[in-house]
Image (cartoon, coloured by chain):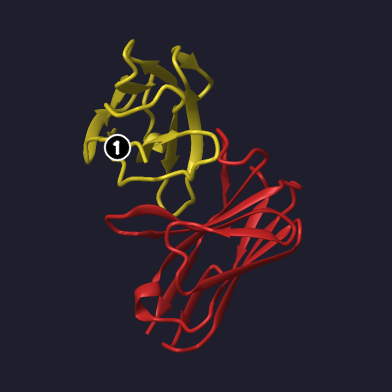
Chain colours: A yellow, B red
Amino acid sequence: DAKTTQPNSMESNEEEPVHLPCNHSTISGTDYIHWYRQLPSQGPEYVIHGLTSNVNNRMASLAIAEDRKSSTLILHRATLRDAAVYYCILNNYGQNFVFGPGTRLSVLP
Amino acid sequence: DAGITQSPRHKVTETGTPVTLRCHQTENHRYMYWYRQDPGHGLRLIHYSYGVKDTDKGEVSDGYSVSRSKTEDFLLTLESATSSQTSVYFCATGTIPWSYEQYFGPGTRLTVT
């Protein structure tokens, strides 16, 4: 399975943008990049996904490097509710989702 | 929300006893998954189902069995619980296999003493 590397933890101030990095140097051409997050005491929830182009939705933006070996999840204005563990996952059709340890984001008021 | 419930939400049981966890969904999603979450391991896939009576093993299936007799219910059974199976168990559903979006339940915290 293709692997991802994320920082263990990050901090942000409320109402400031947050850039969560993910390295995936062994990504294959057909791997999608997914981001999920897990709020305290809850199950994971889908955030965003992409293949090659940058993506935006109501929750976040996903910036994908041109060589696809890294990506960045962007939260445009962090709120206290965004404090969670963020998982970057590579997935190819027909393969299991593999959740690593993720990045624990703390948001300071 | 995909209308996923898990029961029980918390359970304490003794080593050697059988335990069944239930996942119930109201969205008519075809695909269902069971994961366990342990500190330092992220989530690991136990078993999954791609339809009624169609199931397969995931990454950490030893000691677990599953059944799916109806679209809405996916049962996870620990045949003889061990302390190593103390964990938080999450059920997930989806409309497309290994798709872009899986919907997760609230989890069941199981403690095996």
Query: Up-down: is B45 above or below A5?
Result: below
- Residue B35: give x, y in percent of width and height: 48, 57
Q: In what quadrant of the picture does the C terminus of chain A appear? A: top left
Query: Up-down: is B105 above or below A59?
Result: below
In this rendering, position of residue B70 left or right of residue A43 = right
Q: Which of the pair B6/A100 is nearer the observer?
A: A100
Query: Up-down: is B38 above or below B1?
Result: below
Chain bearing mark 1: A
Q: Which of the pair B113/A53 is nearer the observer?
A: A53
In this rendering, position of residue A105 left or right of residue A93 = left
- Report the residue at 57% width, 36% height from top: B101
- Report the residue at 28% width, 38% height from top: A106
- Residue B3: give x, y in percent of width and height: 68, 49
Query: Up-down: is A44 above or below A108?
Result: below
- Report the residue at 48% width, 33% height from top: A92
In this rendering, position of residue A46 left or right of residue A25 = right
As helix, strand or loop, the secondary structure at mark 1 comes to strand
Q: Quadrant of residue A86?
A: top left
Q: Which of the pair B90/B62 is nearer the observer?
A: B62
Amino acid type indicated by mark 1 = Leu
Q: Which residue is mark 1?
A: A105
Q: In what quadrant of the picture does the N terminus of chain A appear? A: top left
- Residue B95: give x, y in percent of width and height: 68, 40
